[in-house]
Amino acid sequence: MTNTLFPRIDYEFKDDKLIELALTHKSLSTINNERLEFLGDAVLNLYVSERLFDTYENLKEGKLTRFKASIVSRENLQLVATEIGLSNHIKLGKGETLEENSILGNVLEAIIGAIFLDSSYARTIEVLDKLFQDNFLELVEEKELKDSKSTLQELLQKKYKSLPRYSLSNDSTNKLNKHFQISCFVDAADLISHGEGKTRKKAELDAARNMLKLIESQ
């Protein structure tokens, strides 16, 4: 089972009882993953804090805290869990579902705790690097490009004495795998750009970046 559960991160448990426990929700049994979730949450927070501290030497505490919050958020953990197909393996009690709750993210934390117990912190870091590599790449991109929404707003206020307008074009009906499409309107210049992302904010940033490129090309 571990080979099919972790093809992306290339991890196989030595003790299958740990992964079985990590996948067992409290709705199914009193012997469940809550303690592993507690441990995994602590390991994940330490990992993200260390990684941010080492990567962004010039960032102050407030910015580091914001970056960390975005990576360990319920929303992001749900997305990471969905990407590795975790929903196909969770053991739920009768009547329990994965809709409109944080079970997926909680189970991901339990698995992180199980990996830590099954191996070592160093090995767990290797796994987490693969699981969260996209998040850190996005943070690097954000740091390099700054906030395109703020840049666009400043430009439009100076050039047109107006602000951009954002509209949700479409979002997936699958609540476990959100995908947003945003349109950005600059009415004063009769311009429209589009952006996509796993969250509305990321889609708006993408649309703002594309609008900046559109304005520069005129």
Image (spheres, rainbow, N blue to C red):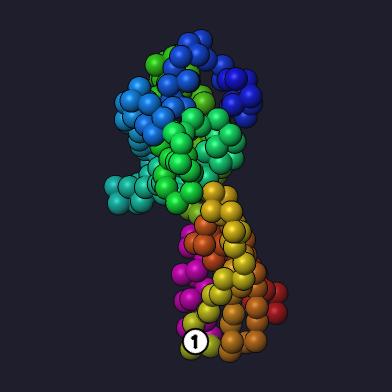
- Quarter of the image for residue 170 reads bottom right
At 51% from the left and 32% from the top, the residue drawn is: 90
At numbered mark 1, what does the secondary structure look like: helix, strand or loop?
loop
At 45% from the left and 41% from the top, the residue drawn is: 96
Badge 1 is on which residue?
Answer: 162
Compared with 95, 2 (above or below) is: above
Residue 116 visible here: yes
View extreme (right): residue:
217
- Quarter of the image for residue 45 reads top left
Main secondary structure found in the magenta portion? helix
The quarter of the picture where the N terminus appears is top right
At 62% from the left and 29% from the top, the residue drawn is: 8
Across and down, in percent, residue 143 comes to 48, 53
Query: Is 149 a magenta residue?
Result: yes
What's the magenta region? 144-159
Q: Nearer the viewer, residue 63 or 110?
A: 110
Query: Is 93 a magenta residue?
Result: no
Instruction: Indicate left or right for 31 with 98 as reference.
Output: left
Across and down, in percent, residue 82 comes to 56, 41
